[in-house]
């Protein structure tokens, strides 16, 4: 960690002196090993130490246009260095991925309001890698990796983001000219939202309805050039621009795009899955949803992003809470560190536990994605729906928790948390954006619920279930009897499973009852609230189940002192979860008031133990000061000095008297109204 060289605040030093486990060992776990931590630090320093980035400039004070231009300038500095470093490292694909993974946070420090090239290196490149045939790979990948072309992923339209089956952009094939003609037949068919589209990229993957031989064959991906390679002017028939100011992501350059008779060559339809013969004959893919593959990959990646945003927010909130003193607990004693107020612990400690459990889930899901993709490459697509359901469910649950936790962290910093210099606003904006992009969270939960209902039917009919939903058998086996609660970690898991299965049953029954008067679709819509609750509970089951399995493995492999910290973290996650979901649990589990009181007491005991470890855990997340970028969360804990120094940098403080005094205020004050 590049620690600030200033003297560490004595309250924070006192906390660190009490840490009773090896922080470095925790860091090595979080990043996947000592070698990876070394790499991370090297890469971080390699980029952040570059004076050309001019990181001294606080871009939050710039205008919308200046922010964008500075973000582009900084990104180019970074990407030039990236390619230099890539060559130095050996130039393999693995080296590239390593640098990109580590750049995730570094980029956040360089462009706090978003990266104007993020889609090129994520969705654009991934779609070309995964949805093209060999010839197309050979044509496009070198140009993408050399950045000779820059691209984005243009799917969402003004009228449709969720229901992509009804996208309106058309691509009509003419076998005589061997070209597609792209059109935006209505205003609502304009592409709207794609990141980097407005003024940055010159190419896009465009999702459009394919028409051939007079028939519509559903949405297919096309690679389309949008701007001239020399002048960057929009090509004929292309209407393109920036969509304007947003809640966040100000420098991501989200754009709009309309087509009027734009010609695209035959070879530009991505043909790994669906195929179109030159004569216009359409050949269906093995599974029509294969074209949704890039979204699945990104949803999987979003779990680790959520974990890291929570880790960052809790680092800021906890460090601040260990140096901020306010409100004596005993009237005659000195004001305590605010963390001594138990409500403050309740705000921050469960968040730290979530970051750890989400990280376990991200590792698990990444492995699962890899194994299901490998199966897919051999033609076996059987587990694709399971992966789709799981990634939708966890994308929704983890980003919802992420936004909630980051906001609680902001509140836990009181007034100072509302300052931009506290560093929580960009984290929150990114968290809340993640609730919407890559599939709106309610819609994602409903997709997961579809899988749950199918599995429930399967279980009722004595069929087979995938591992993650086998608990539905237990529910059916109990035949209406309630699960008996026992206060162990596995007891809590069984209780959450019973709640998830119970809610699935309620949703299923709701649909079955309504089906008598309505179509299955209407009945399903009417059960929507139950369905989303069931999917959400299922997401928590997955998190706890994977958390238990992964943390048990971790405990076997780390020192006993760190093992105890992991045990504490897992219990914190589990007890916090059951207490938050107690209403659902009571409905399906035989749990007494005494049991609940015991859980509440247990939480207090867990807080007591975690009180000494917490600072070690957040230090172990290993965010350097430039990455944390917070007056309240810096390693040295000198928050008041940081706050006043940051305030002095406000553009308004660069002069004693602002011109508005003479222009408006003084005449107003002298006017006697
Ligand atoms: C070099 C590497 C570096 C990597 C670094 C990575 C770093 C990441 C950084 C990323 C930064 C990104 C910045 C922001 C980007 C935002 C991009 C976007 O938002 S882009 C825009 C994002 N936009 C969105 O996310 C749009 C959201 N909407 C959708 O995804 C779809 O409309 C839908 C899935 C909700 C429904 O689809 P619809 O066709 O209407 O389907 P129905 O309802 O009729 O039927 C459901 C049936 O289909 C089945 N199934 C479905 N999918 C799959 C699948 N993938 N598979 C298998 N099956 C699937 C399902 O199981 C079910 O089966 P059954 O029950 O019938 O048996
Ligand atoms: C920051 C950001 C970046 C983005 N980047 C890109 C990008 O790079 N490329 C791209 O193509 N797109 C991008 N998008 C678009 C994004 O993917 C969509 O906005 C998202 O998928 C939601 O779709 P929507 O806007 O149509 O919402 P809507 O579907 O209109 O949602 C509005 C409301 O309707 C509800 N609703 C809709 N359908 C259903 C249903 N079936 N059942 C129940 N409720 C429903 C939703 O729950 C929500 O409450 C981005 C969006 C954002 C915010």
Image: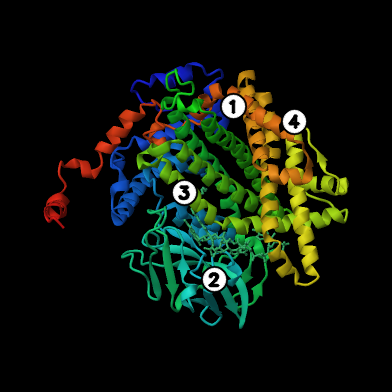
In primary-sequence order, the first of circles 4 and 1 is 4
Residue 494 versus residue 523 in the image, above or below:
above
- Number of the front mark, 2 or 4: 4
Q: Alpha carbon of mark 3 to alpha carbon of mark 2: how far?
A: 28 Å
Any part of residue 478 in sight: yes
In primary-sequence order, the first of circles 3 and 1 is 3
Q: Are marks 3 and 1 in contact (CB under 8 Å)?
A: no
Residue 390 falls left or right of residue 433: right
Q: Alpha carbon of mark 2 to alpha carbon of mark 4: how far?
A: 52 Å
**SS label for mark 1:** helix
Residue 15 falls left or right of residue 443: left
Q: Are marks 2 and 1 in contact (CB under 8 Å)?
A: no
Q: Quadrant of the C terminus?
A: bottom left
Front residue of 523/56: it is 523
Q: Alpha carbon of mark 3 to alpha carbon of mark 1: how far?
A: 29 Å
- Number of the front mark, 3 or 2: 3
In primary-sequence order, the first of circles 2 and 1 is 2
- Number of the front mark, 4 or 3: 4
Badge 2 is on which residue?
208
**SS label for mark 4:** loop
Badge 1 is on which residue?
607
Badge 3 is on which residue?
430
Q: Alpha carbon of mark 4 to alpha carbon of mark 3: how far?
A: 36 Å
Q: Residues within 10 Å of mark 4 (few under 14, many from 20)?
A: few
Quarter of the image where one finds residue 498 = top right
Tell me the tag on residue 488. 4
In the rendering, at what x and y percent does residue 252 appear? 41, 54
In primary-sequence order, the first of circles 2 and 4 is 2
């Amino acid at each position: 960690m590049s620690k600030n060289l200033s003297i560490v605040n004595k309250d924070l030093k006192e906390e660190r002196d009490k840490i009773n486990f090896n922080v470095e060992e925790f860091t090595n776990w979080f990043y996947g090993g000592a070698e990876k931590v070394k790499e991370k630090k090297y890469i971080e320093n390699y980029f952040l130490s570059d004076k050309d980035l001019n990181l001294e400039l606080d871009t939050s004070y710039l205008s919308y246009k200046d922010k964008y231009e500075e973000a582009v300038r900084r990104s180019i500095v970074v990407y030039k260095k990236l390619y230099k470093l890539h060559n130095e490292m050996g130039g393999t694909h693995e080296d590239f991925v390593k640098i990109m993974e580590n750049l995730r946070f570094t980029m956040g420090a360089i462009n706090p309001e978003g990266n104007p090239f993020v889609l090129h290196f994520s969705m654009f490149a991934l779609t070309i890698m995964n949805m093209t045939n060999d010839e197309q790979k050979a044509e496009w990948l070198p140009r993408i990796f050399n950045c000779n072309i820059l691209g984005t992923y243009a799917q969402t339209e003004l009228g449709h983001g969720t229901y992509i089956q009804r996208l309106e952009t058309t691509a009509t094939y003419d076998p005589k000219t061997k070209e597609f003609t792209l059109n935006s037949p209505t205003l609502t068919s304009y592409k709207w939202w794609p990141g980097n589209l407005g003024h940055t990229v010159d190419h896009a993957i465009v999702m459009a309805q394919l028409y051939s031989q007079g028939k519509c064959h559903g949405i297919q991906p096309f690679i389309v050039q949008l701007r001239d390679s020399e002048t960057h002017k929009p090509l004929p028939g292309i209407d393109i621009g920036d969509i304007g100011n947003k809640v966040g992501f100000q420098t991501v350059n989200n754009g709009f795009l309309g087509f009027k008779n734009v010609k695209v060559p035959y070879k530009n339809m991505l043909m790994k899955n669906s195929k179109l013969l030159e004569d216009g004959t359409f050949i269906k893919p093995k599974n029509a949803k294969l074209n949704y593959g890039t979204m699945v990959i990104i949803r999987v990646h979003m779990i680790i992003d959520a974990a890291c945003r929570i880790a960052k927010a809790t680092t800021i909130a906890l460090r601040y809470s260990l140096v901020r003193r306010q409100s004596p607990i005993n009237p005659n004693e000195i004001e305590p560190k605010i963390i001594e107020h138990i409500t403050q612990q309740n705000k921050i400690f469960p968040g730290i536990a979530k970051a750890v459990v989400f990280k376990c889930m991200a590792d698990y899901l990444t492995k699962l994605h890899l194994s299901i993709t490998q199966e897919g490459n051999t033609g076996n697509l059987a587990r694709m729906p399971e992966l789709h359901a799981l990634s939708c469910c966890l994308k929704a649950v983890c980003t919802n928790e992420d936004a909630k936790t980051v906001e609680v962290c902001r509140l836990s910093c009181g007034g100072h948390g509302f300052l931009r210099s506290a560093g929580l606003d960009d984290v929150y904006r990114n968290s809340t954006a993640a609730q919407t992009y890559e599939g709106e969270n309610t819609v994602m939960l409903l997709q997961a619920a579809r899988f749950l209902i199918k599995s429930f039917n399967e279980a009722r009919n004595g069929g087979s279930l995938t591992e993650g939903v086998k608990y539905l058998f237990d529910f059916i086996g109990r035949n209406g009897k309630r699960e008996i609660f026992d206060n162990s970690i596995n007891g809590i898991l069984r209780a959450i499973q019973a709640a998830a299965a119970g809610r699935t049953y309620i949703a299923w029954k709701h649909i079955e009852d309504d089906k008598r008067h309505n179509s299955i679709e209407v009945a399903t819509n009417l059960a929507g609230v139950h369905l989303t609750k069931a999917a959400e509970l299922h997401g928590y089951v997955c998190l706890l189940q994977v958390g238990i399995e992964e943390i048990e493995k971790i405990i076997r492999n780390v020192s006993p002192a760190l093992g105890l910290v992991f045990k504490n973290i897992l219990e914190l996650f589990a007890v916090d979860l059951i207490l938050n979901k107690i209403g659902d649990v009571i409905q399906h589990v035989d749990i007494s008031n005494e049991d609940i009181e015991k859980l509440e007491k247990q939480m207090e005991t867990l807080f007591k133990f975690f009180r000494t470890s917490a600072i070690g855990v957040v230090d172990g997340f290993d965010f350097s000061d430039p990455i944390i970028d917070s007056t309240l969360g810096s390693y040295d804990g000198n928050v008041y000095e940081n706050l006043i120094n940051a305030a002095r940098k406000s553009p308004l403080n660069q002069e004693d008297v602002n011109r508005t005094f003479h222009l408006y205020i003084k005449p107003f004050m002298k006017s006697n109204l």
